[in-house]
Image (cartoon, rainbow, N blue to C red):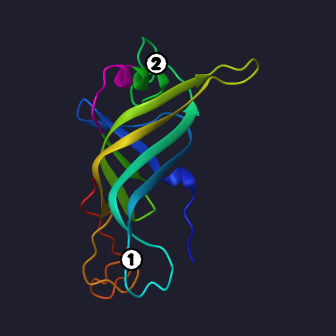
Amino acid sequence: MEFTLGEDRLMYIKINGSYLPIGCLIGNSLEEQSEFIDTTTRDNKGWATSRPIFQNYTLSFNGLQVNTTLAGGNFNIASYDKLRDLKRNKVLLEWKLQGDKYPIVDFGECYIQTLSNTENVGEFLSFSGAMVGYGEPQQQGLTSVLLNNGNPNTIVNDGNPESLIRIGEV
């Protein structure tokens, strides 16, 4: 069994046509929920039954603050200052969760719902937030494999199991 570290699957948002990682992430998550409606069947023998009707999802993140909007800042990431502007302007964002090792990329659209910053004496400035999904989240494989040998990253090519192909990146 192979495990992937959390730092390999980062959260990105699309700004001006480019996906930028949410800067200095400490953690991020994707949580899906379903609302249910109670149902009745003839054979439930007194047990409650229900069916899912509406689904939704939220994305959460927290990180350390860096300058990403003013002169001298890092413009290749999105930190608290950039996220604050996107939230206040009610911008519909494209997001993705992606890494180099974990083979699944989740993506979709969202709005920033909450955003907070923390300024404790003797500690780094930090921030956290949550985004509410807009529509259905999507997924695709980081790689597409043809004629593989059971390893999703290996193509058997004339007996050379070291041949790799990566296509279809979000």
| Quadrant hosting residue 84 | top left
Which quadrant, please, contains the N terminus?
Answer: bottom right
The quadrant in which residue 34 appears is: bottom left
What span is in magenta? Answer: 85-93
Label ID, residue 37? none
Of the residues shown, which amino acid type is indicated by label 1?
Glu
Judge whether residue 66 is colored magenta. no
Which residue is found at the position 31% from the left and 66% from the top?
143
**Disc 1 on helix, strand or loop?**
loop
Which callout, 2 or 1, points to the residue nearer the camera? 2
Residue drawn at 50 percent across, 54 percent down: 8
Label 1: which residue? 162
Give SS at disc 2.
loop
82 or 154, nearer to the observer: 82
The mark nearer the N terminus, 2 or 1, is: 2
Please tell me which residue is depicted at 43% across the width and 56% down the height of the picture: 33
Give the crowd class for mark 1: few <14, some 14-19, many >=20 residues within 10 Å.
few
Q: Is residue 77 visible?
A: no
Image position, residue 43 (x, y; %): 41, 88
Residue 15, compared with residue 54, is above or below; it is above
Classify residue 105 as left or right of residue 80: left
**On the rendered structure, is 104 left or right of 67?**
left
How many residues crowd mark 2 within 10 Å: few (<14), some (14–19), many (20+)?
few
Evaluate whether residue 110 shows in this view: yes
Among all residues in the image, which is located at the extreme top? 71
Distance between the alpha carbons at the discs numbered 2 and 1: 41 Å
Contact flag, marks 2 and 1 (Cβ < 8 Å): no
Above or below residue 1? Residue 24 is above
Which of 157/118 is in front?
Answer: 118
Mark number displayed over residue 73: 2
What residue appears at the point 32 percent right and 88 percent down from the top-left corner?
Answer: 159
